[in-house]
Image: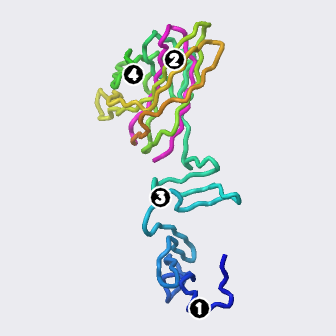
């Protein structure tokens, strides 16, 4: 770090900082901080406020607070419009969404809705809602007179969201090894004030994963593959599980990490 000791102002003025308002100085209105020759910095200060605004380019570390060792603990990323915290640099507005099922009774090769959050089959008398027998669940769904059951299977996105990771734990109720497939989808849900309200369309795969050799003696933990991460406000998120092998009951917990975009 250099020193100004013994140096003339005419030789050092470029390295000095001042506010742009050279008449009033620091006041109630934020004034941009400049160097001695008038080059603007990203800082503006007032007597009660501080503003940071890039002058030329956005950056992933427009603001960075570090520990003594130089590890970022708080960063403001103006390139991606987000704030990250901690040594893991996790999004500051990270949330956890869970889907879970207790002794869901499947038909082999069929995709079933998994209840959202605490709406487990143990706590509520829910019907198993099937949605297709293809490689992936169907992209549309009309629950008809079981729409009252469907409401417990869906998460309505309150804001635009980004899915960061999906992980699930699964077991079954016999000694027979099974293959379990999990899919996370987003849908557009009709809300037009008519008899089709609650119908799902435009299904898009968000994530998928497969657990093999699943039986009642083990708990398989799988990190799913993210296929599409973006969910728009007022879209709904649904989780599906499939026993590819047989009709053994499924016990499942799915953890979805997301942040508000």
Tell me the residue that label 4 is attached to: 137
Locate residue 9, reporting x and y percent: 59, 91
Judge whether residue 38 is colored magenta.
no
Q: Is residue 229 left or right of residue 50?
A: left
Q: Are marks 4 and 2 in contact (CB under 8 Å)?
A: no
Query: Is label 3 in a helix, a strand or a loop?
Result: loop
Residue shown at the point (42%, 30%) measured from the top left: 185
Q: Bounds of the magenta span?
A: 233-261
* Residue 252 among magenta residues: yes
Considering every residue shown, the one lying at the far right of the view is 68
C-alpha gap between disc 2 and disc 3: 41 Å
Element under label 2? strand
Q: Nearer the viewer, mark 2 or mark 1?
A: 1
Q: Residues within 10 Å of mark 4 (few under 14, many from 20)?
A: many
In the depicted view, which residue is nearer to us: 101 or 167? 167
Magenta span: predominant SS is strand
Up-down: is 142 above or below 161? above
Cα gap from disc 4 to disc 2, whole angstroms? 14 Å
The kind of secondary structure element at disc 1 is helix
**Which of the 4 quarters of the picture holds residue 216?**
top right
For the residues labelled 2 and 1, the Cα–Cα distance comes to 74 Å
Q: Earlier in the sequence, mark 2 or mark 1?
A: 1
Which mark is in front, 4 or 1? 1
Picture layout, residue 37 above or below residue 139: below
User: In the rendering, which numbered label is found on residue 9?
Assistant: 1
Q: CA distance from mark 3 to mark 1?
A: 36 Å
Q: Give the residue number, with chain letter if any, for mark 2.
A: 180
Q: Earlier in the sequence, mark 3 or mark 4?
A: 3
Disc on the earlier residue, 3 or 1? 1
**Element type at mark 4:** loop
Q: Which residue is mark 3?
A: 78
Mark 4 or mark 2, which is nearer to you? 2
């Amino acid at each position: 770090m250099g020193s100004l000791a013994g140096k003339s102002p005419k030789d050092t003025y470029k390295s000095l900082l001042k506010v742009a308002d050279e008449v009033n100085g620091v006041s109630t209105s934020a004034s941009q901080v400049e160097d001695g020759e008038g080059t603007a910095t990203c800082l503006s200060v007032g007597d009660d406020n501080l503003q940071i605004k890039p002058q030329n380019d956005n950056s992933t570390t427009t603001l960075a607070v570090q520990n003594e060792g130089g590890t970022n603990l708080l960063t403001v990323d103006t390139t991606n419009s987000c704030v990250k915290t901690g040594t893991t640099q996790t999004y500051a507005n990270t949330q956890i969404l869970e889907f879970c099922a207790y002794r869901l009774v499947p038909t082999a090769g069929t995709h079933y809705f998994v209840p959202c959050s605490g709406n487990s089959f143990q706590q509520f008398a829910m019907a198993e809602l099937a949605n297709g027998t293809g490689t992936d669940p169907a992209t549309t769904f009309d629950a008809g007179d079981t729409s009252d059951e469907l409401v417990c299977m869906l998460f309505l996105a309150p804001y635009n969201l980004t899915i960061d990771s999906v992980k699930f734990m699964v077991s079954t109720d016999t000694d027979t090894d099974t293959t379990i497939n999990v899919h996370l989808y987003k849908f557009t849900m009709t809300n037009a004030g008519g008899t089709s309200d609650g119908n799902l369309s435009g299904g898009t795969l968000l994530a998928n994963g497969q657990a093999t050799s699943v039986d009642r003696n083990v708990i398989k933990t799988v990190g799913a593959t993210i296929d599409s991460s973006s969910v728009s406000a007022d879209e709904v998120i649904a989780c599906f599980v499939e026993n590819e092998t047989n009709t053994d009951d499924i016990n499942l917990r799915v953890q979805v990490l997301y942040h508000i975009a």
